[in-house]
Amino acid sequence: MADRRSSSAGAASSRRPVEHAWLVTGPLALVAVVFSTAIGLVTPHPFGEWGLAGVLLAVMVVAGLPMLNFVIGRQSFGVRLTEIPLVLAFYFLPPLMVVLAYTLATLVTHLRYRFGFAKLAFNVANACAAASLAALVLLALPPIRGVGPGTWGVLFASVSTLSLATLVGVAGVITVMHGWQAGTGVLRNVPPLLTLAINVVVGLVVLIALRTTWWSAVLIAALAAAAALVYRSYAQFFRQHRTLGGMYDLTKAMTAEGQSGNLVDVLLGRIRALMQAEYATLWLPAQGRHPEVMLTARVDDSGLLDVAPTPEVIREETRRQQRSLALGVRLGGDEELRASLRTTGVKDVIAVPLRSGQAVIGTLEVANRLSDVGHFTDSDIPIFETVAAHAAVALENSRLVDRLRHDAYHDTLTKLPNRRRITGALDEAVKIRAPGEVVAVLLFDVDGLRQVNESLGHAAGDKVLVEVAERLRACAPSSALVGRAGGDEFLVTLRLENAEAALELAAQLREQIRDEMVFDALTLDVDTAVGVAVHPDHGSDAASLLQRVDLAATAAKSVPGSVQLFNPALESRSLRRLGLAGDLRRALDEGALEVYFQPKVTLRDRRLVGVECLARWEHPTHGTVSPEDFVAVAEHTGQLGRLTEVVLREGLRRSRDWSHTGQPLAVAVNLAARTLTDQHFPDRVGELLTEYGVPPQRLTLEIRESGVLDGTDRPIPTLRRLRDLGVRLSVDDFGTGDSSLAHLRRLPVHEVKVDRSFVQGMATDPGDLAIVNAVVTLSQQFGLAVVAEGVESELTLELLQDIGCEIGQGFLFSRPLPYERLEAWFGAQVDPETISSGESPRLRVVP
């Protein structure tokens, strides 16, 4: 017989109060009374031999003990042998005595389990009603005669009626308590009726043996004892098989879900089912960037709960003692901890530490063995510990995968999202952009980080990057995604009203970053160039937006500390530079680049003292290419050395030729900052001076302020070797950077060229006039010559003369000219008498 007992779900999981069970118990008791009365009235002798009834009652009690237990959902099925004594009772005893004996056996059996009164009343009423119904069926069938097939059919029908009626009663009370789906689940999940048939057949065999001779009872008793041992062994084997199968399924499920986000769901659900527990709880305390995890699987719920039924002290003790804790009726345990369980309604619990090596990373626990009669035992502890060991490995592997996935999308230094993560977020953002808004991308390029690395070491540079990251993260709006694009570049992306709002935000963030950074005893001023691009104006996908914001940031670098919004001209210029790389190589091979010359004149007496050599390129397709563009192309394609040598050769050749004609003019050649990192460059300059026979003092090498005063000592060795050659050194575009004249004192330079932007503003801006005046005065005190660029008016010339500037160049004297036109200019502007006298040629007029 399959007897089903519902588990004690508790108030939280029961859908209706326990008192609702009386809605079924009452009618069942009434049916039992009515049917039993009817049996007594229709039976001439309702009671038989009390001694035999007592023996059969004892047999029923023993047969009512479960041989095998199954747990399905919250319900516990016990496979019993009650059909065997029922066959004998219906044969040897009057029907009413069978009802009485079966009811008493049910009462004794259930008293053993200490059920509540409502559940005990239901089980007794259900047993009495089912037995009385079976007795009525027995009376309605032909009377029993002998032990032939007719008797077999009558007894089978009666016993089957009792079992099925009992099952229907259980389904009814569960329907009332938990709903019709749970009630129908009882009928679906009942073990096969094959067990019922086997037990009835065994009972009939015992009946035939007893009818043959009562001495067969001895053999039957021996056989029953042996069968009990076999049943017990089979039950143990069945439990072991089920446990191994469950552990195999659990391990396979953990392997399958290890790299997904469902590992904990699968883990707790499988463990709860394997241990036949009402609750399974996982607790992982906060560790690193991982927050605390507290999740519970409950038999009634499809999802996970974020609470646990057991007190926190049990988990803390398990973690502190680093060993398993088992508390319950059959487990014993610390009395204080057991007392804490009573207040929660948990009857038993096993808590096991989860280990990673020697460290405890959390706990795993199960609570409440399903069914009212079930309890965890000592044999469950090693099983659960084995499960916990597998779970710990799976969780550690899952965290490792999560850590690797996190590292793949985050920068290791600043912990910010990296370019890959930002690209993915941008792709999602542009897909769901709402009308009336833009997706803005801001790129912050940190200025001077290379100088910090070279002067103070990479550790200082890393501190700067971390500080910039923290400031951006703190100052950016909460809706913004802040990330590191790589190197010294940071990205900020968010939704804004328009491009103007993006520019305003970029300027605000840049100001926040510019605040002083203090590292130990060192204070640094860090600035950034900011590029801005917005969707949909500047791109429809992440790749194009990132490319264009890169171009905007590059353009912003040309004006230190500026914020640049992308415009199509930047992209066309970038594409043009990219296309010029191959053309520049061919132009150098074919000698297609020209060198123009711009005269340098003493301002006091207008004597011609030299020329500046300037490379020019007339592209057959694109027309005139600006020097800024093709010099940048040369730098990025490794052709800078060839370009510099072309200009040097042409300048030295012309200087030699002018010397032969009695016009010894100095030549000046511009150098890129990267050239100063070439340790072979001074040797090459010496070789060219020797090759063309030009005295070193007639060659001036001009380096932009940002290249020679980059905050490091890197260019100094090259500059000193050039000075030792006798070559003059000049700082070009002075005033556009952040350096001061005091910085020049430690450099081996001879000349300062004031940037044209200050010279051209002298006549209208008192500030520019003051700057030029200060540069000229201090330079002269340091023994440096001063050259003013951009002299374009007589008023400017007079102002420069008044403040004592020595040399100038600009459109007032001449534009840069090719060699042939320069010769013509010489003939028109130079006084022949000064040439014949061996002096520096003097201009006779200033056009």
Image (tube, rainbow, N blue to C red):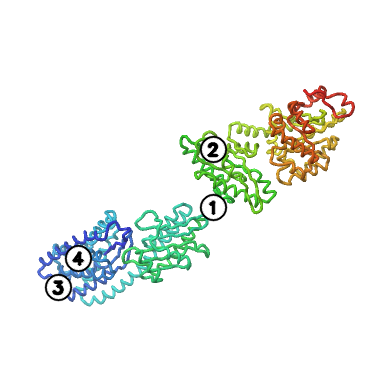
Of the two numbered discs 3 and 1 on the same chain, state the one appearing first in sequence. 3
**Numbered disc 4: secondary structure:** helix
Q: Which residue is mark 1?
A: 404
Give the image quarter of residue 21: bottom left
Q: Is residue 616 left or right of residue 186?
A: right
Q: Which residue is mark 2?
A: 502
**Numbered disc 3: secondary structure:** loop
Q: Residue at x 9, y 69 (%)?
A: 44
Q: CA distance from mark 3 to mark 1?
A: 80 Å
Q: What amino acid type should be assigned to the residue bearing mark 4?
A: Cys
Q: Is residue 332 left or right of residue 555?
A: left
Q: Is residue 169 above or below residue 527?
A: below
Q: CA distance from mark 1 to mark 4?
A: 65 Å
Q: Nearer the viewer, mark 1 or mark 4?
A: 1
Q: Is residue 119 left or right of residue 804?
A: left
Q: Which residue is mark 4?
A: 128
Residue 139 percent coordinates (x, y): 14, 64
The tag on residue 48 is: 3
Residue 362 percent coordinates (x, y): 47, 61
Residue 45 percent coordinates (x, y): 11, 70
